[in-house]
Amino acid sequence: MTQRVSASYLIATLQDARARTLELVNDLDQEQLMGPKLPGVNPLRWEIGHIAYFYEFFILRSLYGHDSILGLKADELYDSIAVAHDTRWDLPLLSMTETLAYMNDVLEKVCAHLVNKNEDGLASEQDSFIYQFGAFHEDMHTEAFIWGRQTLGYPSPTFSIQSNVDSQRSVGSWPGFCKSSWW
Ligand SMILES: [Fe+2]
């Protein structure tokens, strides 16, 4: 059972996850967005498209019956179960501009489904679950972007929310990302 949460909370959660994703890719050039073929990382341009695909697949397509914005290409490009890891660099991926537009379109559409659905402002239990599932999936990938950037020797990203907890250990969770000494 998932506790019902407000639609505004879900939208803010999705927007927060998206802001973090964009902070992790916006400073990279086209070459960096693909990077070398390595077992422990994904091409970032593939990975951000996959994030949008995940919301689209589980919310817009499976729950609400929409067709994919990308048509058949969506599954062929961004289904992480069907698309083998070492083939992701060689796919006819969307350009970065197209990928960002796809991500934005999906985000707008999933948020539109939440607006004014219930008088009490609460999302349904099903929506409360699946929207947070999508956002946590995106958050998991932003963690992967961080290790990917470190693995590839890219510059440290600039986060809008960043806490320095070097002097405070074992104090529980903190908002945003923490800059640690290994970065
Ligand atoms: Fe994923």
Image (spheres, helix red, strand yellow):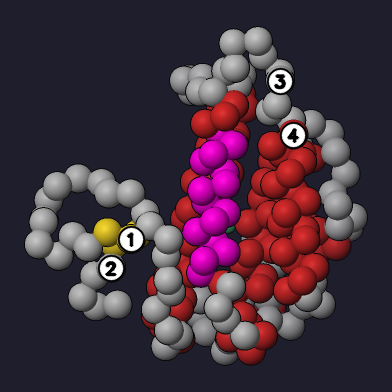
Mark 3 or mark 2, which is nearer the start of the sequence? 3
Residue 158 in the image: above or below residue 123: below
> In x, y percent, where is residue 130?
60, 34
> How far apart are the alpha carbons under marks 2 and 3?
39 Å
> What residue lies at 84% left-to-right and 34% top-to-bottom?
65
Residue 180 seen in the current view: yes
Residue 125 in the image: above or below residue 142: above
Amino acid type, residue under disc 4 in the picture: Ala
Residue 122: name its quadrant.
top right
**Over which residues does the magenta segment extend?**
10-24
Image marks 1 and 2: residues in contact by CB distance under 8 Å? yes
> How far apart are the alpha carbons under marks 3 and 4?
9 Å
Horizontal arrangement in the rendering, residue 137 relative to residue 176 (left or right): right
> In x, y percent, where is residue 109?
77, 41
Mark 2 or mark 1, which is nearer the start of the sequence? 1
In the rendered structure, does residue 115 fall within the stretch colored magenta?
Answer: no
Could you say which is closer to the camera, residue 30 or residue 12? Answer: 12
Question: Which residue matches tag 4?
Answer: 112
Amino acid type, residue under disc 3 in the picture: Asn
Circle 3: element type:
loop
Residue furthest out toward the top: 119
Residue 116: image tag: 3
Main SS class of the magenta portion in the image: helix
- Local crowd size for mark 2, using a 10 Å CA cut-off: few (<14), some (14–19), many (≥20): some
> In x, y percent, where is residue 58?
69, 41
Residue 35 in the image: above or below residue 166: below
- Dot 1 beta carbon under 8 Å from ligand 1: no
- Local crowd size for mark 3, using a 10 Å CA cut-off: few (<14), some (14–19), many (≥20): few
Question: Which residue matches tag 2?
Answer: 179
Amino acid type, residue under disc 2 in the picture: Lys
> How far apart are the alpha carbons under marks 1 and 2?
7 Å
Circle 1: element type:
strand
